[in-house]
Image (cartoon, grey):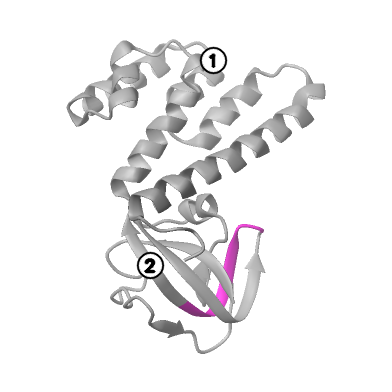
Amino acid sequence: MTLAWHFTGAALRDGRPLPAIGETLRHEGELVPCKSGLHASELMLDALRYAPGAIVHRVRLGGVIIPHEGDKLCASERTILWSFDATETLRAFARAQALSVIHLWNAPDVVRRYLETGDEALRAAAWDAARDAARDAAGDAASAAARAAAWDAAWAAARAAAWDAAWAAAWDAARDAARDAANTQLTAMICDAAGKTENE
C-alpha cells in the first residue's frame, strides 16, 4: 500500500462519479501508465501537473503498483481517504509562487497588488498589465518571468538569464531545491486548509 495524491474535477476522467470516501476502486485488466489503471502521485506537486480539476484526494494505492516517469504511479486499486476542494488554496499558492520571482521583472503595481491580496476585482487588470508588460519586455527571460504564475516558467526565465554553461548544475540544484520547497509549501497549505495531515 502506498499513500499518494490525486486531483479530479467533479467526476473521474472517464465521467464516472467520484467514489465515496473509503470506497476502493479496482482496475481489471492490464495496467498501462497514462492509458489504463488508477493513477496518483506521491508528491502533491507532481499530482498537480496532471490535475483536470481542483479537488484533491489523499489516496491509498494497492494491488499492483507501477511507477511511471518518476512522478506518477499506476495501480490496480485506489481508495480515497479524504478529499478537499482546493480551488482557493491553489490560487493562493500560485500567487505566492509568482511573488517569489516578482523581483525578476519590473512588475506593474496592479500585478503586485493582486498577487499580494488575491483581490478578484484586480485579477483582470493584473492579467492585462502582465500581458502588456510581457509583450513590451526585452528578451525571453523577462517575458517568461512576467507569466511566472507557473513555477517552471519562472525557473526557465532564471535559467535563461544564466549566461555561462558552468552555472547549469547550480541552476539545476537550485531548481530542485525550489521545487522541493514548493511541494512542501503546497502540501502544507492544502492539508492545513482541509484540516488534515498528509499521513491520514
Q: Is the magenta stretch mostly helix, strand or loop?
A: strand
Q: Which of marks 2 and 1 is nearer the N terminus?
A: 2
Viewer-proximal residue, 182 or 132?
182
Decide: is 113 above or below 8. above
Which residue occupies 69% across, 19% down? 162
Residue extent of the magenta highlight: 70-78
Image x and y of residue 200, in percent: 47, 66
Which residue occupies 31% across, 61% down? 9
Answer left or right for 24 relative to 120: right
The residue that label 1 is drawn on is: 139
Viewer-proximal residue, 55 or 150?
55
Decide: is 86 above or below 17. above
On residue 12, which mark appears? Answer: none
Quadrant assignment, res 174: top right
The residue at the far right in this view is 166
Q: How far apart are marks 2 and 1 (CA)?
A: 45 Å
Which residue occupies 53% across, 40% down? 182
- Which amino acid lies under the numbered mark 2 shown in the image of this protein? Trp
